[in-house]
Amino acid sequence: MRRQFRHIFDRAPLGYQSLDAAGCIIDVNPAWTQTLGYAREEVIGKWFGNFLTPQYVDSFRKRFPEFIETGQVHSEFEMWHKDGNLKFIGFDGRVGYYDDGSFDRTYCILQDLTETRQMERKLRESEEKYRHITENMTDVVWTADLELRKNYVSSSVTRLMGFTPEEYIRLPLDRKFTPEALKTIHEMMAQEMEN
């Protein structure tokens, strides 16, 4: 059974680590070393906080005893890859206990969230840029679904039409558009959907 477990451990697609009661690394699998670039021998026995960026070290120091006490954790840390690059890593862990109920070690799976966090940051920056542009235009900018229900209206609607964006979104269509404008919008949307 032990050989079978080691086989699974070594071939697992996600990184795995065990820590002792002091927060030092007992074991890591190949996916862990591949994610962070270290050889196994470089990390065994080292304090886990040594691999965290400075702003996460205190958080680990505080949260690790809580993890031991509660028996489980979900956490995210920024870590150093051996090449000096930063990695954003998510951890899910449980505590292992001896038969007498005392602490044995932690069992944690880690997942590299770096690309996800970078995409989220780029999306936020893009949304902020879009919002800045729309909020500073001299026209009203809006988006709507296929039923012409508005889901965004720029704040310039207040200056130009006297409505807050929230009020304008709630207005019925006949208060927002003339019949001719509605017809034109529907024709444009139908043409766009054909293309």
Image (cartoon, rainbow, N blue to C red):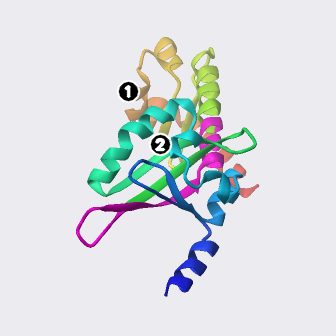
- Percent coordinates x, y for residue 26 in the rendering: 51, 59
Q: Can the viewer see residue 16 in this picture?
A: no
Choose between 135 and 125: the one closer to the eye. 125
- Percent coordinates x, y for residue 115 in the rendering: 66, 48
Mark 1 — residue? 167
From the viewer's perspective, is 195 left or right of 100?
right
Q: Is mark 1 on a helix, strand or loop?
A: helix
Above or below — where is 153 with respect to 79?
above
Looking at the rendering, the stretch of residues picked out in magenta corresponds to 95-122
Q: Is mark 2 on a helix, strand or loop?
A: loop
Amino acid type, mark 2: Arg
Amino acid type, mark 1: Glu
Residue at the image position 61 percent from the left and 36 percent from the top: 121
Residue 22 in magenta stretch: no
- Percent coordinates x, y for residue 135 in the rendering: 57, 19
Above or below — where is 152 with respect to 106?
above
Residue at the image position 32 percent from the left and 52 percent from the top: 68
From the viewer's perspective, is 194 left or right of 88?
right
Residue at the image position 56 percent from the left and 84 percent from the top: 3
- Residue 113 is labelled as none
Between the residue at mark 2 and the residue at mark 1, the CA separation in whole angstroms equals: 13 Å
- Percent coordinates x, y for residue 66 in the rendering: 31, 46
